[in-house]
Image: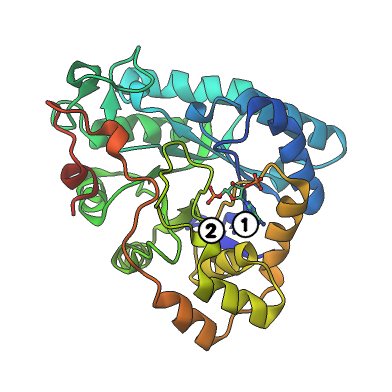
Amino acid sequence: MQALRFSNGDTMPQTGLGTWKIEPKHTREAVLQAIHAGYRHIDCAFAYGNEREVGQALAAAMAEGIARSELWVTSKLWNNAHHPDQVRPALEASCKKLGLDYLDLYLIHWPVVQKEHVMRPSQASDLISLKELPLSKTWGALEACVDAGLTRHIGVANLSVAKLQGLLKTARIKPEMDQVELHPYLQQDALLAFCRENGINVTAYSPLGSGDRPGAKAGDPVLLKEPVLQAVADRHGASPAQVLIAWALKRGTAVIPKSANPEHIRQNFQAQDLQLSAQDMADLAALDRGHRMISGDLWCVAGSDYTLATLWDE
Ligand code: A2P
C-alpha cells in the first residue's frame, strides 16, 4: 500500500476512507467494508456526526484481529472548540467516541472560530475573529496534546499558504498535514509546492468532486461527468473515480474518497494499481479551473471578519 512518510518515520496509508456525509446508520458497515477491502486509513471529524459509528467499526475490526497500530485514524477539532482550554477535551471526546486511546492525526478543521455553543454560524455574533483567537493559540494546545500522547501527529485543514506561513512562525511542532480540497478542477499547485518545500504532507479531500455535498446547485460542474476524465478512464478500462484517485496519488497526496457503497469502496481502493501516463496527467492538468466545490461561504456571515477573501487569502 502506498504511504506518506512523517518526519519521525511514521507512515500514513495514502488512500483513506472519507467519512464526511456517510449517514450514521450506514457508517459502521461502510467503515468495516473498507477495512475488509484493505483500507487502513479512516478520515473522521467531530463535525461529521458519526464518530461513534466509526468507533463501532474499528472495534469490530480489532476484534477480528486487526491491530490498532495497523490503523491510521485522523479526526478534527471543530470550529467551536478553538479556545486552548477546549482543545484537549474535544480531542478526548473524539477518542472516546472512536474507542481509541490516541489518534494518529488531529487537525484544526477550519481557520474559523465559533462560539462554544455554535455548531454552524448564522449571525456575526456566533463567530470570533482570528485576530481575537489566532490559530497560533489553538495550535499551542494541539502541541500539548502531542506531548500528552493523545495524538501522534497534528496538522490543519483548509489553510492557505499565507496562514501556513503565519503558523510556521510560532509553531514548536510544525504542522505536518494540510488537508484541502483537491481535484482536477481545483489543483492548487502553488499550495502543493509550498507544502513540499516545508515538509508538510497534503491530503486531498472531495477528490471525486463531492457530488453529494450539501448545497450543490444545478449548473455546478460535475467532475465525475467530465468528458476528458472519461476519456482517460476509457484508455485504462477504469472508472472516472479510479482515475481521480490515481491522479491524487501520483501527485504525492493522500486521498480520502467518501463512499457508502461497497462496490465503490472496493474499486476506489483498487485505484492504487492504476498507473496514469504522462499524457493522462497532462490531459487532467489542463482541466484546472480553480473551482471550489466547498466554497467556504458557510463561514462568511455578513458583519463578521470572515469573507471568502480572508478565508482563502485569494
Ligand atoms: P457513494 O457514497 O454512493 O459511493 P467525494 O469523496 O469527492 O466527497 O465524493 C463522494 C461522492 O462520490 C459520493 O456521492 C459517492 O457516492 C460518490 N462515489 C464514491 N465512489 C464512487 C465511485 N467509485 N463511482 C462513482 N461515484 C462514487
Residue 277 lies, with reference to residue 112, above or below; the image says below
Q: Is mark 2 on a helix, strand or loop?
A: strand
Q: Which one is in front, 310 or 4?
A: 310
Q: Neighbour class for label 2 at 10 Å: few (<14), some, many (≥20)? A: many
Quadrant of the frame with the N terminus:
bottom right
Q: Which residue is drawn at 69% across and 41% down?
A: 260
Residue 154 position within the rendered picture, expressed as x and y whole percent measured from the top left: 44, 42
Disc 2: which residue: 254
Q: Residues within 10 Å of mark 1 (few under 14, many from 20)?
A: many
Q: Do the residues labelled 1 and 2 touch (CB within 8 Å)?
A: yes
Task: Identify the mark nearer the N-term, 1 or 2.
Answer: 1
Quarter that holds the C terminus: bottom left
Circle on res. 15: 1
Which of the two residues, 203 or 70, is positioned nearer the viewer here? 203
In percent of width and height, residue 148 lies at 48, 29
Where does the image place residue 40, in percent across and percent down from the top left? Answer: 70, 49
